[in-house]
Image (cartoon, grey):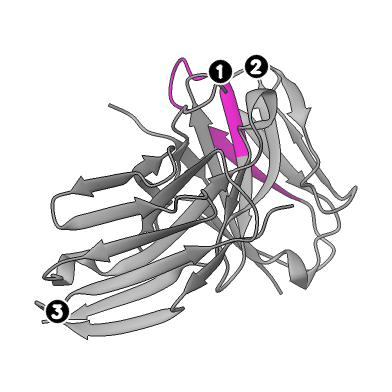
Amino acid sequence: GAGVSQTPSNKVTEKGKYVELRCDPISGHTALYWYRQSLGQGPEFLIYFQGTGAADDSGLPNDRFFAVRPEGSVSTLKIQRTERGDSAVYLCASSLTQGFGETQYFGPGTRLLVL
Amino acid sequence: TQLLEQSPQFLSIQEGENLTVYCNSSSVFSSLQWYRQEPGEGPVLLVTVVTGGEVKKLKRLTFQFGDARKDSSLHITAAQPGDTGLYLCAGREGSGGSNYKLTFGKGTLLTVNP
C-alpha cells in the first residue's frame, strides 16, 4: 500500500526565499508529525497535528516556521526568509492515532539546501 | 527534554562479524524504539521495547531494554552487507497524552563490508 509521500524530494533555494514542503500521510491516519534531521544528527521533533489542529508546535525553532493541515490529511510546512542554517532533511511521519504504542511511519523526506 | 546518547557513532566491520550498539540516557523512558535509516529514506521501525529487562529478537538482531528503562542495546549476529545503514534509537517522552513525541539519538552509522 502507499506510504507517506513528500514533495519535493529535493529543494535548493537562496537565503531569504520562502519555501513550502508538502506531506501526504497514509490514508486514514489522523496524526501527522514533522521532524527535522540535520547532517550527522537524529531527527528532531518540530510539530504534531491531530486532525486539522496543531496539537503541539513546541519544536518549531522560531516564527519563520509554520505548518498547516487544513483538511486533516495533507500538510504543508512553510519556511519564510530561509537561512543557511535551515538546510536539513525535513521528515514527515503519520500514525493511525496518537495513542501509546502507535507506530509512526516516516516518509523519505525533503532535502532542503539554502544557499 | 530527555537526551539519548548512542555509541559508537561509526562502525565499520567485515561480513560475518558480530556487533553491539548502545543507547543510553540519564532519564527513564516509557518505551524505546530502534529504527534503521538508509540513504535517501526515512527511518523504518525495527522494534519497540516497553518493559524493563525486555529482550526481543528479530532474526539476527537482538534488542534489550535496560532494567531501569534508561538504556538499550542492539546486537547483530553475523552481520551482512544488507545490514548497512544508520541505526537510530528513539524514546517516547512521558506517558498518556504526551507520549507521541519521539526523542532520537544521533545514530550509529554501520557499514558491513563484503
Q: Amino acid at mark 1?
A: Thr
- Crowding at mark 3 (Cα within 10 Å: few <14, some 14-19, many 20+): few
Residue at 26% of width from left, 64% of height from top?
Answer: B75
Chain letter belonging to callout 2: A
Q: Which mark is residue A30?
A: 1
The picture places residue B36, in percent across and down from the top left corner, at 35, 56
The picture places residue B60, in percent across and down from the top left corner, at 14, 57
- Crowding at mark 2 (Cα within 10 Å: few <14, some 14-19, many 20+): some
Residue B102, placed above or below residue B21: above
Give yes or no for contact between labels 2 and 1 (Cβ–Cβ under 8 Å): yes
Which span of residues is magenta-colored?
A: A19-33
Mark 3 secondary-structure assignment: loop
Closer to the camera: disc 3 or disc 2? 3
Q: Quadrant of the C terminus of chain B?
A: bottom left
Q: Quadrant of residue B105?
A: bottom right
In the image, B53 versus A72, the foreground residue is B53
Relative side of B84 to A55, left or right: left
Residue underneath mark 2: A51
Marks 3 and 2: same chain?
A: no
Is residue B5 part of the magenta span, yes or no? no
Mark 1 secondary-structure assignment: loop
Q: Quadrant of residue B16?
A: bottom left
Q: Amino acid at mark 2?
A: Gly
Q: Amino acid at mark 3?
A: Glu
Residue B39 visible to an observer of this rendering:
no
Relative side of B45 to A19, left or right: left
Q: Which mark is residue B17?
A: 3
